[in-house]
Image (cartoon, rainbow, N blue to C red):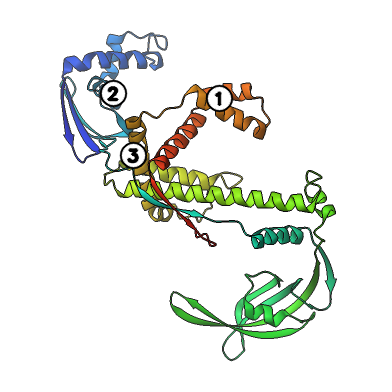
Amino acid sequence: MEVSITDITEVEKEIQIHASADELAPHFEEAYKRYQPKIEIKGFRKGKAPLDLIKKIYGESIEYDALDTIASNVYRQVVTEKDIQPIGQPVLTDIDYKRGEALTFKIKFEIKPNVELKEYKNIKVEKIIHPVTDKEIEEEILRLRRANSILSSVESATDDEHIVTVDIQELDQTGNPLIGRKSTDVRMYLSDETVHPEIRTALKNTSVNARSQVKIDLEHDSRKLTDYLELTVKKIDKVTLPEYNDEFVSKITKQKIKTADEFYHNVRKDLEEYWHERSERKLTDAIVAEIVRRHDMTVPETLVKGVLDSLIEELKNRYPNKKLLPDFDEKGFREEHQSYAIFQAKWYLLRERIIETEGINVEDGDLERSAEQDAPKVGIEKDRLLTFYKSSDTVKNRILSEKLMQFLKNHSVITEKVTKEFID
């Protein structure tokens, strides 16, 4: 069998295979035997016709039908013998065969690139540290109080602790209503900082059935725009907040926490954990981004497509029937996320190479520690959870990623920056 391999790109190859008639003969014999049980020939029971007769009547058709299967089998045999590790699905690009003669075919396939590691240690990155303030704790407690507030219908709004339901009609500059530009039953909580200041001012001290017009200056894509609105008040609800005391805390925590002081410290702890996790996540992203930036490589389209496919599947899983909406622009979505997919494909290859180079692996002790930490959280006995972890590739991959990132953090030059703001 004659085999030649051509490099199309760093990650794409084309293999041409030439098989003689003698080399094809055993493959065709297998094809005849596969077809024999299905064939009916007059004078013989189904599947009992002799092979010589089947070859005479159906031989040419069977051989041509079997070519794709033969090409696939021969291709797999060749890549195994030559220790080639293709990724994705190979594509048959050309096939040439005349009965009784040789078969020549070409198949394109992709491989992972030979990743040459450059700098991935001693990377300088900034770690954002966000100290939790008393104001944040008080705002979180206020949010919980509002979530447990009582609404009562009133005739007028006397302070910010009111929800005003309005119809909003867009107007032209002369004050005439714009057809089809009306929103009804819009609820405005006057304490909500996202409510536009002009609208909040117009609705303060308002009453049911009152009308007011507001002018809002906006800026969009460096252009200044002005909206003219007419607000019609339909309903006003007074928001009565519960007092922040031991009784309130006991109620919302189902008596797990009994005092306001203890709850305050618990909120602080939760917020500190939240900001710590965000800080670590941003640090991880910064290290990964810098490593990827330092490595220029060609990535196989198979890997890029795999990332995009997974994003599509995530979208599908958000719907009950796991189907995209009929008007969803999948092509546009893939184009929009192409750069992200290329980045993730590069990191996948680099991650794999660093793990191999540094000899990072998951040991029994790692699985045991993870099971011990997770058991109380999931309510499963540690030994049972450990048995599952030992058989789960997903869990092992998670632990491997955690060990890799800890290794990279330990070998990075990290500068901490304390800030009140935390930008995503």
Q: In which quarter of the image is residue 135?
A: bottom right
Compared to residue 330, the image places residue 96 above or below, namely: above
Compared to residue 102, the image places residue 340 above or below, namely: below
Three-letter amino acid code at disc 3? Leu
Q: Foreground: 238 or 145?
A: 145
- Mark nearer the viewer, 1 or 3: 1
Tell me the crowding category of disc 1: few under 14, some 14 to 19, or many 20 or more residues within 10 angstroms, Cα based. some
**Residue annotated with mark 1:** 368
Three-letter amino acid code at disc 2? Arg
Three-letter amino acid code at disc 1? Glu
Residue 96 seen anywhere in this rendered image of the structure:
no
**Which residue is depicted at the point 64% across and 72% down?**
195
Asked whether disc 2 touches disc 1, contact meaning CB atoms under 8 Å apart, the reply is no
Q: Position of residue 111 (x, y in %)?
A: 28, 34
Q: Where is residue 420 in the image (x, y as percent from the top left)?
A: 55, 62
**Residue annotated with mark 2:** 76
121 vs 391, left or right, is left
Q: Foreground: 69 or 150?
A: 150
Q: Is mark 2 on a helix, strand or loop?
A: helix
Q: Position of residue 285 (x, y in %)?
A: 43, 49
**Residue annotated with mark 3:** 350
Q: What element carries label 3?
A: helix
Sequence-wise, the earlier of marks 2 and 1 is: 2
**Which residue is depicted at the point 29% across and 35% down?**
112
Tell me the crowding category of disc 2: few under 14, some 14 to 19, or many 20 or more residues within 10 angstroms, Cα based. some
Q: Give the Cα distance between marks 3 and 2.
A: 27 Å
Compared to residue 255, the image places residue 352 above or below, namely: above
